[in-house]
Image (cartoon, rainbow, N blue to C red):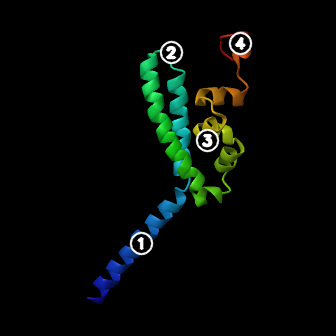
């Protein structure tokens, strides 16, 4: 009986420690999700193969998800206290990482915020050439 109790407690401790380790190692999960959502938003906004109505519907749903994820990332102490390069770059480029919040602060659309932050304007687009690099 003692060996069965010892074995079950050992299994429980091992399970709980592996669960805790998985949660700690995945502290940047919400930041990675934010990066994926931002990529999805930019792909949707620049997709020439969809209509304006579909683009508007998709982008509105992505805006809502991004705003929620941005809030989660900003409030997560594990991310704020992390010394990972991904976190440092994310906060160094606040206007690009937190695109929905930055665009709301400046009262512009997220695509305009993204283009302005990268220095892309109508003149630079007109001067660009299509081709491979």
Q: Nearer the viewer, mark 2 or mark 3?
A: 3
* Total tally of numbered discs in the picture: 4
* Quarter of the picture holding the C terminus: top right
Q: Which residue is mark 4?
A: 128
From the image, which quarter does the N terminus lie in? bottom left
Q: Are marks 1 and 2 in contact (CB under 8 Å)?
A: no
10 left or right of 78 in image: left
Q: Earlier in the sequence, mark 4 or mark 1?
A: 1
Tell which of 2 and 85 is nearer to you. 85
Q: Residue at x 66, y 35 (%)?
A: 106
Q: Which mark is in front, 3 or 1?
A: 3
Q: CA distance from mark 4 to mark 2?
A: 18 Å
Q: Are marks 4 and 2 in contact (CB under 8 Å)?
A: no
The percent position of residue 37, horizontal first and vertical second, equals 51, 37
How far, Cα to Cα, is label 3 from label 1?
38 Å
**Element marked by disc 4:** loop
Among numbered discs 1 and 2, the one appearing first in the sequence? 1
Crowd class of label 3 (few under 14; some 14 to 19; many from 20; radius 10 Å): many
C-beta proximity under 8 Å, tags 3 and 1 = no
Quick one: label 2, few (<14), some, or many (20+) residues within 10 Å?
Answer: few
Q: Position of residue 91 (x, y in %)?
A: 68, 47
- Residue 98 badge: 3
Q: Quadrant of residue 89?
A: top right
Residue 121 occupies quadrant: top right
Q: Residue beneath label 1, please?
A: 14
- Give the numbered dot on residue 48: 2
């Amino acid at each position: 009986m003692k060996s069965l109790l010892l074995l079950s407690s050992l299994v429980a401790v091992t399970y709980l420690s592996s669960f805790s380790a998985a949660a700690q190692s995945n502290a940047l999960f919400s930041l990675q999700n934010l990066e994926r959502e931002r990529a999805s938003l930019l792909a949707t906004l620049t997709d020439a193969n969809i209509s304006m109505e579909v683009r508007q519907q998709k982008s509105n749903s992505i805006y809502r998800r991004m705003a929620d994820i941005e809030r989660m990332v900003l409030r997560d102490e594990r991310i704020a206290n992390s010394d990972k390069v991904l976190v440092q770059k994310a906060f160094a480029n606040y206007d690009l990482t937190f695109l929905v919040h930055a665009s709301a602060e400046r009262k512009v659309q997220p695509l305009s915020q993204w283009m302005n932050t990268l220095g892309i304007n109508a003149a630079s687009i007109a001067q660009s050439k299509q081709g491979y690099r």
